[in-house]
Image: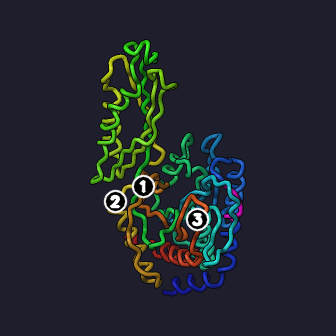
Amino acid sequence: MEAKKQIHEWVEAHCEEMTECWKTLVNTPSHVSRRNEGEVLCAKLKEIFDELGFETEVVESCPNNSPTLTGIWGKERPGKPVLFSGHYDTVDLKADLPFRYDEEGHVRGLGSLDMKGGIAITIQVIRCLQAMGWNERPVKILFAGDEEIGHRGGLAGQTIRDFSKGCLCAFNMETGLISNDICVARKGAAFARITTNGVASHSGNAFTAGRNAIAELAYKIPKIQALTDLSSGTTVSSNMIQGGTVINSVPGSCFLTVDIRYQKLSERERVMKEMGHITEETVIGGCSSEMSFDEYMPPFEKTAEVVRLASFVSQVSEDCGFGTMGQKELGGGSDASHIGMAGVPVICSMGVCGEFNHTEREYALPQTLFSRTELLANVVCRAKEFEQ
């Protein structure tokens, strides 16, 4: 009970300082497509965590993507580390969206919700723990710079999996849900591209010489759509098709892009296998097809340990007077998936709460900066209860 009181009093005494930290992060641009911006914010975060006593490292992902910041505080302590994770990049929006309050008292600004508020919470949790003299186990942090593009073309996903191994549990500080629920699962996401080649010819003078690539691909689409299995949480959607050159020519090529979402890796394997068969099958002689597959976020699978961690956090929330936290499965991906693949119990959506990510309407509830800091500081202090 003493720790709970100390945490509450510290948060109440530092609200202005906490908000200023949040504002600073939001007002430091870090669009995912602009590596130069990402490097600036990554350096700023490194400086903050270095001052907090972390041993930090900037890990490169690839030449085009912003790097990943990792760090550990109290490496010499016994016990498994607790991990706070997330990303510091934002989506690309052209509008100038600085940190500000709207007429309803909500915080607005690009990244205020997704997810610089979550990084601000992490910083405040560490400051609070240090003010209390807490030193029971190591604490790790990891913030990637290219999550909004699914780490495509880079090595950040592998960095996350490697750095997470051996942790007791992890809190992915993504957008908090307005319902106050905890995210315990997310779908994986991938794109498939099927390219079909036929034989181009004049559709009037040489119709029989042509092999219509669009017609060939059209035979495949109903079979692709049929791979959807809503009972398993799998959706397969043919979302973009392009082919042909002019109206009076039989098209010699065509391509289709397919959006694929799945809750389990086994479903990914099923869909890939079946789409491979569909691609190989030919209806119109003289046509051929090939497929490429690009997974940009693996699934964050709901496990018994994930549920147990969420239940523990909900119990701490009740004890702190913040109410019960439900459990929710979401469709969009996050880096909780990579942490889960490392065998670490992880829960997601632990950042500030709000709505409308990736739009100019993005907003966050300012009070949740304080309540989530208080909640997670208590969770860390009581981590032994989860370990048992």
Coordinates of residue 308 in the picture (x, y in percent): 35, 68
Image quadrant in which you'd find residue 41: bottom right
> As drawn, is 39 to the left or to the right of 374?
right
Most foreground residue, 367 or 374: 367
Q: For the residue carrying disc 2, how many other residues have a C-alpha within 10 Å: few (<14), some (14-19), or many (20+)?
A: some
Question: Which numbered marker is on residue 362?
Answer: 3
Residue interval drawn in magenta: 25-30
Most foreground residue, 204 or 183: 204
Coordinates of residue 150 in the picture (x, y in percent): 52, 48
Q: For the residue carrying disc 1, how many other residues have a C-alpha within 10 Å: few (<14), some (14-19), or many (20+)?
A: many
> As drawn, is 365 to the left or to the right of 282?
right
Residue at the spot 36% in from the left edge and 26% down from the top edge: 216
Question: Which numbered marker is on residue 340?
Answer: 1
Magenta part, dominant SS: loop
Cα separation, mark 1 vs mark 2, equals 9 Å
Coordinates of residue 244 in the picture (x, y in percent): 48, 26
Residue at the spot 68% in from the left edge and 62% down from the top edge: 97
Q: Would you say the residues marked 1 and 2 are in contact, meaning their CB atoms lie under 8 Å apart?
A: yes
| Residue ranking furthest to the left | 231
The residue wearing badge 2 is 303
106 up-or-down from 63: above or below: below
Residue at the spot 47% in from the left edge and 21% down from the top edge: 249
